[in-house]
Structures are given as C-alpha cells and as structure tokens.
Image (tube, rainbow, N blue to C red):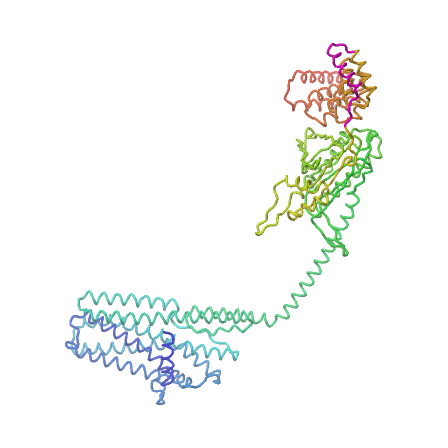
Amino acid sequence: MSQIFDQIFKFLHRTISYSFAIVFFSLQGAFFGAFYAYFFGSALIPNFTIDNHPEVVNVFVFATLLAAVGHSIEFGILTPLGYGGFRSDVRKLNLFLKRNETIRHKDILELENNLNTLIHLPKENMYAAIRYALMIFLSVSLTYIVFSYPLYELLLIFIGWLSAVFVYGGFSYIISDYATGSKRVEIKKILAYRDVTVHKNFGILSLKGKFIFLLILILLSLSVLSVFISFGNASLLKITAFITMTFIEAVILIYMFFQSINRTLEQINESANSLASGGSGALPILSIDKEFILFAKNFEKATREVGKIRENLQELVEAKTSELRNSLETVETLKKQQDGDYFLTSLLIKPLSLNKTIGSHVKTDFLIKQKKTFLFHGRENEIGGDICITRTITLRGKDYTFFLNADAMGKSLQGAGGVLVLGAAVQSILERSNAVEAVKLLYAERWIKNAYQELHHIFESFDCSMLVSMVMGLIDDETGLMYYLNAEHPWSVLYRKGTAEFIKNNSELRKLGTPFSEKSLEISTLQLLPGDILILGSDGRDDIEFVTETTARKINHDEELFLRHVERGNGDLKNIYQSILTMGELTDDLSLMRIGFKENSHQPPRAIRKESYELMRKAKNQIKAESLEEAKTSLLEANRINPENREIKRALIRLLVRMKDYQLAAEKLNTYIEEFPGDTDLIYLASFTYKQTKEYGKAIDMGERIRLRNPGHLSNLIQLVQLYLIIGNLPKAEKTLHLTSLIPTDTKRIDSLKSQIASFKEKIVAEIPS
C-alpha cells in the first residue's frame, strides 16, 4: 500500500504540482465528509431526497464542487498554467519544487522558508478544509431560509455537517503530514549537510491527538451507522455502501498513521547506528508530531555532546592516559612498598620456621605452600599464616623432639604477623629451655603446659584480633612416647603399616588468643612404634576447590579425603602434595609436617626368659597365698635375670607398695618412670609412694603430670589437695579442690578436704599477731 500511495503522489507531482498532489488526497477527505453528511441527513430527516429537497441538494452539490475547485486552485492546481495558488507561500513552494529538478543547489534561506512552509502545510490544509466546509454549510443554510424549509432540519444538517467537517479536516491534516514527510526530510538533510541548524517546529496534532482522532472517527462511524439503522430509513445497499466507505477511510488513515510512526522509528534507528559507527548521527526526522520533535531535540543535544567528545577525544585520551599512567605509577610504587613489606616480613619469618632436630631416632620434614605469592627484585616469594617448627631439646637428661604446626588467622600480611609473633615466642621458649637449668628439670607435660600458657597470654593481649590454631608437642626420642595438645587445629594423622588414621582426642582447647579455662588444658599421649609416621597439616589440606565443568564453585567438605592422600603418597610429603593438586586447586595456605620414628629400626618385642617366666608364675601363686615376702624374693630374682622386662618391673613395684616397702618401691619407680613414661597408672602410684616417703615435691610433680594427662582423675586431684596442704600451699590446694567440684562424685572426701582447708585457714589467722 505504501508503494501505491508513493507512486500516485510522484505521478501527480511530476504532471501538475507538488501541492496539488497533496490536495488531491485531501479532497478524498471532502468526499468522505460529504458522504457522512449525506448519510447523516438522510437518516435524521424523513423523506430527504432530491425530489422533495431539490434546491438543497443542488446547492449542496454545486457548493461542494466549488469548494473542491477552490481548494485545488488555492494549493496550486493551475501551477502548470503559471498560477501557483492563492497563498504566496504555497506559490513559492510550487515554484521551488519544480518537476524533475533537484533542490540541492538551492539557497539556504530559500530551503529554510520552504521547509517551514512544508511543516505548516498540514495545518493550513486542515484550516482550508474547514473554511470550504463552512462555505458549503452556509450555502445550504441560505437555501433552507430562502425556500422556507423547516429550520429544525437545518439543525439536524448542522449536526451532520460537524461530523463531515471533522472527517474532512482530520483527513486533510493526516494526509498532508504523511505526504510532505519525505520532502521535509530531503530538505533537512541538505541543511544538515551544510551545517545549518534546523528549526524544530511541530504540528498542531501530536501522536496522542492523531490517535484520539482515529478513535473518535471509529466511534462516530458506529454512531452514524446506529442512527441510520434506528430511524428505519436504511436499505441494505445504503448500509453496505456506508460500511464499505467507512472501512476504506479507516484503513487509509490508520495505515498512514502507523506507517509515519514506523518510518520515523527507522530514521531514529539509522541515526543511532550512524552515531555509534562514528558518523554524524544527524536526525532529519520525518514526523512533525510533538513527541518525536522533542525527542529529536534531545537527540541533537546528545549528538552535539558526542561530537564535542570526539573532537576532543585525542586530548581526552591523552589526559586520561596520563592520569592512568600516574595512577599506575602510584599503584606500582605502593605495590613495590607492599612487596617490600612482604619481603621483609618473609625474611623475618624464615629464621623462625626451622627444622633443627639432631636426634637419630626421630626424623622431621615439612612442606609449606603459602597462598599469597609476590615478586620482589625479580624473585618470587610467598607469605602467609602457616608455620612449622621442630627442634631437639633436653629435659631431665633426655632428648625430646619439639614440633609445632600452626595456622594464624587472616590472609597474607595479617596471617604473617601472627606467625611472626608466634614464631618469635616459640623460639624464645626453646632457647630458654636449653639455657635455664630450672626449665631443663621439668617433666614433658609441665613443659608443654608452661609453653602453651605463655603463648596464650601473649595472644590474649591482642583481644581476639589475632588467633592461631596449632598442634604442639614433644616426642621422647628414645621411647617414642608423644606428648601433645591440639588447639582447634585439624587432626593429626598416624600412618602405620600402610594405613592412615586420625589421632582424635577430646580436647576442648580453642585457638590461641581465645579465653579458656584451665580445666580444658589436657596433655594427650600417644606411644609411637618403630616405623610409625605422623603427618600434621593445616586446614589448607582440606580447602580444595574441585575442577568442574560449570562456573559454580565446588569446595571439598570431606575431611577424610586427606587420609586417602596420605595413603596414596605413602607418607611422603611431596607425593601427598601432588596427590592433593590432582584433586583440585588450593584455596588457602597449606603446611604439612612429617615426623618419622625409628623408620629404619624394627626391634622385635622383648620376650620374657623362661626362668623369669617361671619365677613370675611362682610369685603370682605366692601372692594369692599371702606369702608376700616369698613373692618379693621371686620377683627380685626375675628382675635380676631379665632386667629389661616391663611386666616384671610393674608386678614388683605393685607388690612393694602393697607390702608398704615404700622406700624400695620409690627407687624402682624412679627408673621405671624414666624408661616407661607413658604408664599413667604407675605415675599415679609413684605420686602415692613419694607421698609415703615424704618426698612431697616428687609426689606433686607426679600428680601434676597425671592432672595434665587426665584432668578428670578424681583420686589424683584429692591426693594433690592433700599434698598441697601438707606443704602449706593453700592457694594451690583451694584451686585444685575447685577442680574436683566440676566432677560429679561422692562428696564425703571433698567435704573432708574443705574442712581441712578451713582449719588450716583458722590456724594461719590465729598465728598472726594482733
């Protein structure tokens, strides 16, 4: 349909004039208006025919033809004969838009004037339609008065005329707007090419107004049809003709309305693409609707801003590049300073994280892979919050291997700060252990307790802003007995005979720096066998991000996966590390420590000799028969024959205590406990024995060792209270007695101790001089 309208318009323009091409289409509106008036009049006025109203009909037809001729001449139908129309602007337009002649060479002022005429042409065409419609109505009105027709019919004709002038005027405006659009765009493009600012004038109807016009037109048509039918003056032929003409009229107007919108949107799209691809982005908009014109103004402002930016783009790019270069230099300077801080911190940490074991039975090794890496002076370094420390120390004449694996809270520098504090404190404790004789006389349990408390007090001063998880302990180099504690660190792994298992405990210790009660401090023990391997590690060993085909992250939550890595790596740190990497990527600092005990020494279990076995059996029978002296003689002889057998020594010591031969029992216990420090029951028996021999210091030491290993051992706690009362250490007695209140038990002995403490206090008060 668009091509049909365009071809008709171009033909009329080439043969007659540009303005007449518009008038030709506008007169279709006059035809539709007359059609509406006729149907409305015939519907409302009974017997309104040419036979009984010949004068009215003749005048109406003549006036309509005269209006059509006048409308045509006004807009240039006689231009080919040299008369361009009634209006001067229309005459100039018809002379300006000559047939088969380009307008690119026209003067700018002439182009602007004619563009303005084209913009106002739809409005002027509508006003002309209203004037000629008014002339027709006045002619018909005079005829009614002259020939004395009923005046009420004239009122009805006036109503029909209003509908006709509505159709005639609206049709003329829309068709003129549509028909002049392409020529307006052509002139606007020429002016834009010549860098002339185009005035953004718009018509009197907006998109909203046109839509309302179309809606009223449809409603009006339905109203006329309903009136026409309701008065009973309608025939099927008239109804069919009315519906057909109304349909044609509505289709033409609706098509032109939406086609105009579509063309305008296409122009906007082309201009936006042109602007985006580096063009001028000129928008010589086709429509003169207010909404599109306002959009064109704003688009032009945006285009000008883009143009300014493009003109100054090089300067802006250079300015921004300079700013970015300066910012980058600042960032690089700050990064160098930061990397320098990292490097200095890593240098301070290195001498603290050392493997300084000298024993031949216990071999240690560790692997640390911090998450944060950095370059400093062309060398790659790393920094983080994991640390491993091992060292040989001597306590009570025996060599112990100290080990520590810790993870400080925080990333990069924050974690490194925690490691720096921890490492310095631990090294200080270790140096003191090798230099101070009083420290060298401590038992392993007491040494670990003191070390933990000292570290805890240091980190407690940071008010929970620096926390450290750790596993720390001592290993007896000769016996393989391990003393250790775990402060919220991942469980250690025991790798024995190709099988890995966690070393679990019921420790309630929290990270260093977290408030804790002394009752939660428990020193655990584990007897290592020749060939055993311990694997310690931070939580980086479990925090693995699996490789998946999706973008969603998948983090490992199976803590037992590490056991499979240990078994797959046969207890070797490098192999374990490679096994972890095959599963995914590390997301946290990783530290691993390996401790092997007598890996190349597989001592067969000591078997009891036949003579000693016979003496042991004989002693048991003698004990049953209450022949304790004979049993003692038998066990002493068995011990002389087989002095290294543990069972003979245990049986002899228990018999000596039963016989109340505490002096000899104490002598035997001295050597037994040094040789078998993991026998907790005999250590408790030693505390009792030393109490009987009045060696209260030794008795308290043994009792404290039991308390650290098993804080819930009630009999040991009660015995400790008694020992502290004996030596007059009331604060210690009260503190230890308080620990018994946390254990549900029979309160008789507890009450008795409370009475003793109360009496002791009264005695002290009585001795104070008044």
Which residue ends up furthest to the bottom in the rendered image?
81
The answer to whether any part of residue 155 appears in the image is no
Q: Would you say the magenta stretch is mainly helix, strand or loop?
A: helix
Residue 320: x %, y % from top left: 65, 65
The total of numbered circles placed on residues is 0
Q: Quadrant of the N terminus?
A: bottom left
As displayed, is residue 386 above or below residue 761?
A: below
Q: Quadrant of residue 444?
A: top right
Front position in the image: 759 or 410: 410
As displayed, is residue 231 above or below residue 54?
A: above
Residue 678 highlighted magenta (yes or no): no
Residue 12: x %, y % from top left: 36, 82
As displayed, is residue 383 above or below residue 696?
A: below
Q: Quadrant of residue 234?
A: bottom left
The answer to whether any part of residue 278 appears in the image is yes
Residue 512: x %, y % from top left: 70, 37
Front position in the image: 652 or 165: 652
Front position in the image: 74 or 192: 192
Residue 228 is left or right of residue 302, and the answer is left
Residue stretch in magenta: 605-628
As displayed, is residue 60 above or below residue 358?
A: below
Q: Quadrant of residue 436?
A: top right
Residue 311: x %, y % from top left: 60, 72
- Residue at 80% x, 35% y: name it: 361
Residue 613 highlighted magenta (yes or no): yes
- Residue at 37% x, 84% y: name it: 17
Q: Quadrant of the C terminus?
A: top right
Residue 190 is left or right of residue 72, and the answer is right
